[in-house]
Amino acid sequence: MNTEFFRKGPFRLFQEGAFPSRLHEPRPAVVLGRWLGAALVVCFVTGLISHALQEWGGRLPSRPVDGYRVTQGLHVISGLAMIPLLGAKLWTVYPRLFEWPPIRSVLHALERLGIALLVAAMLLELFTGLLNTVQWYPWPFPFRETHYWLAWTAVGGLLLHLGAKAPTIAEHWRRGGPEVPGRRGFLAAVTASVGLVTVTTAGQTVPWLRHFDLFGARRPDLGPQGLPVNRTAEQAGTVEIPQDWRLTVNGTNRVRLTLAQLEAMPQHTARLPIACVEGWSFSAEWTGVRLRDLLDLAGVPEDATVKITSLERRGYFRTSEMASSYARDPLTLLALRVNGEALAPDHGYPARIIAPNRPGVLQTKWVNRLEAL
Ligand SMILES: Nc1nc2c(c(=O)[nH]1)N[C@H]1C(S)=C(S)[C@@H](COP(=O)(O)O)O[C@H]1N2
Ligand SMILES: [Mo]
């Protein structure tokens, strides 16, 4: 065979020595792998918590009050940090794409297939997550299930990858041998990128960073009543509240209450966060009627799961379910006021749900019916 042919054009890359930078050696890849691994563990665990709270919210405790705010904030912060980390990691190892021969054995083929799966799952996961943080869902499949199963695929692929690479990782885990030229500068650049991404987005959930929140989806202090909005009253078609609006509570008996009657009931105030799955959050002082007082009025059984329905006609979040651990929590309110003012239409006038440790998507606005399931 004319081996000269393989030394020209794109085939150049398949030659030994085609990638002279020593940053493509295993040591930098192992260092980045550790950082990426740490971010991935945080992102994966907090993602499972978010999934669990949305899927089986009932069987989880309604405390700590800020639980979801913290875990979902970390989820989005670690996910965004993984974008530059993964980019750098892929850059250190991409010369492997041009390994020659491409396949040495069945095991080697499987290993490469595993890596392809891992990289594809990670890229898709970060891409869908990133678009979700800016509330863009351009795909026909349900985001949450897809994001959930891609996460398991990535973690499975990662475990295989770690298994296959265990000897290399062990060998390069500790620093040894001479300093790799350019290593410090490279790692400093990666650290700076991660820092920049974090500082310019984390302000959407970390109050003292809010002034640096250039790229986060929301500023936690911008919006009606100084609070951001997910879906406005206009988008939800709930701008006009019917004159004869009543809250209906269905239990063993049925109760219908006007806003004035709700306001005449004992009012409670709680400082609770809205924590959106998209990664932004804010805390406010909510005032209204304890949900459990309303449920008791209608004779809803203590252990019943409650279905909450809003005036909104269409939309994924027009209803939500709430298990008894939440419904009976003394901090869970049907809020009528926020920070001392009647709710703005965009925040759910005349009444909204607010409960501790509950994902934002389930804090239903424009509520008009509660019923025992
Ligand atoms: N009826 C209804 N309630 C809703 C929504 C909605 O689209 N419709 N969006 C939810 C989401 S995703 C979030 S994050 C919070 C945001 O509350 P805010 O708009 O008052 O900040 O409202 C929740 N309640
Ligand atoms: Mo949300």
Image (cartoon, rainbow, N blue to C red):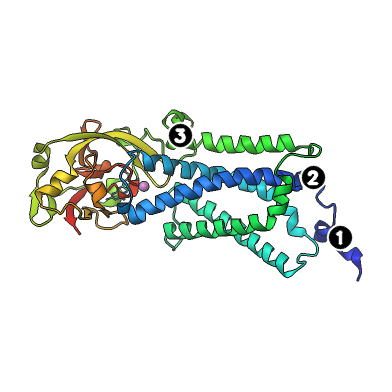
Circle 1/circle 2 CB separation < 8 Å: no
69 vs 16: above or below: above
Q: Which residue is rendered at x = 61% and y = 42% of the image?
A: 35
Q: Which of marks 1 and 3 is nearer the N terminus?
A: 1
Q: Which of marks 1 and 2 is nearer the N terminus?
A: 1
The span from disc 1 to disc 3 (Cα, nearest Å) is 50 Å
- The residue under label 1 is which amino acid type? Lys
Label tally: 3
Residue 335 figure quarter:
top left
Circle on res. 203? 3
Viewed as shown, does residue 211 lie left or right of 303?
right
Circle on res. 149? none
The front one of 141 and 34 is 34
The front one of 46 and 238 is 46
Residue 114: x, y in percent? 64, 62
The span from disc 3 to disc 2 (Cα, nearest Å) is 37 Å
Q: Regarding mark 2 in the picture, which secondary structure is present there?
A: loop
The span from disc 1 to disc 2 (Cα, nearest Å) is 20 Å
Residue holding disc 1: 8
Q: Does the residue labelled 3 lie within 8 Å of ligand 1?
A: no
The quarter of the rendered structure image containing the N terminus is bottom right
Residue holding disc 2: 21
